Structures are given as structure tokens and as C-alpha cells.
Image (spheres, helix red, strand yellow):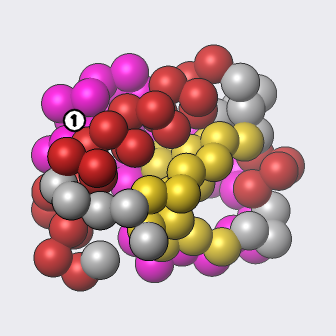
Amino acid sequence: MVNVLCVCAVGVGSSLMLKMNAEKVLQSKGFEVHAENTNVTGAGGMSCDILVTTPDVYGNIRNCTAKHVILMENMVSKRELDEKISAIVGEL
């Protein structure tokens, strides 16, 4: 089971889209996925296998433990997410 945490500033729109895309990408690679979406404050104290967010949001997240961090330039790009997950899939 791969635990994914998707974070945006507000925790509603972009992070929800990231969550759905991360689930699809990882499931297509044969992984069972547990994904959550939240805001910067909600991410504090959480732990996950993969944290997905943007560089500016990542700089504001405190006390979140992640084995891998994926920083998205375009939060809605499934292609970018697939490429970045593919780069770490061997380590999951």
C-alpha cells in the first residue's frame, strides 16, 4: 500500500485533483493506493510515502514526514505527475 498526501494552500481544489491523478497513476502501475488531500496546516504532523505539492506550498509545510517528495510545476498535469512518479516507482 502506497500512502500519498497531496497538499495545496487551501486543501480543496488542486490537492483533490492531485489526489485523484496520483491514485490513477499509481493504480495503473499496479500499486494499491491510499491517498489524502489537505492544506498546509493539515499536513503538519502527517507522514506518507509520497508527498505531492508545489515548491511554494512545500516551503510552508511543517513537520510532515515523507519518503519521497514530488514538486509539481503544473498541479493539474497528469503527464508531469506520471513522469515524476515513474522516476521513484522502483523505490516504493
Left or right: where 16 falls relative to 23: right
Which one is nearer the viewer's eye here, 9 or 46? 46
Residue 41 coordinates in the image, percent (x, y) = 84, 49
Instruction: Name the residue that disc number 1 marks.
Output: 80
* Image location of residue 58, percent across then percent down: 58, 51
Q: Nearer the viewer, residue 34 or 17?
A: 34
Q: Quadrant of residue 14?
A: top right
92 vs 85: above or below: below
Q: What is the tally of numbered marks visible in this picture?
A: 1
Left or right? Give the position of 37 relative to 66: right
Task: Give the vertical position of 73 relative to 85 (above or below).
Answer: above
Quick one: 42 or 32, which is closer to the camera? 32
Return the x and y of residue 63 as percentages of the image width and height. Answer: 76, 72
Packing grade of label 1 (10 A; few <14, some 14-19, many >=20) is some
In which quadrant is the N terminus drawn? bottom left
Q: In the image, what residue occupies the spot 55% across and 51% down?
A: 35
Residue 84 seen in the figure: no
Is residue 68 something that shows in the picture? Answer: yes
State the quadrant of the C terminus.
Answer: bottom left
Residue 24 is situated, as x and y percent measured from the top left of the image, at 32, 38
Residue 57 lies within the magenta run: yes
Residue depicted at x 52% and y 65%:
3
Residue stretch in magenta:
54-83
Disc 1 is placed on an element classified as helix
**At label 1, which amino acid type do we have?**
Glu
Q: Relative to 82, is 19 on the left or the right?
A: right
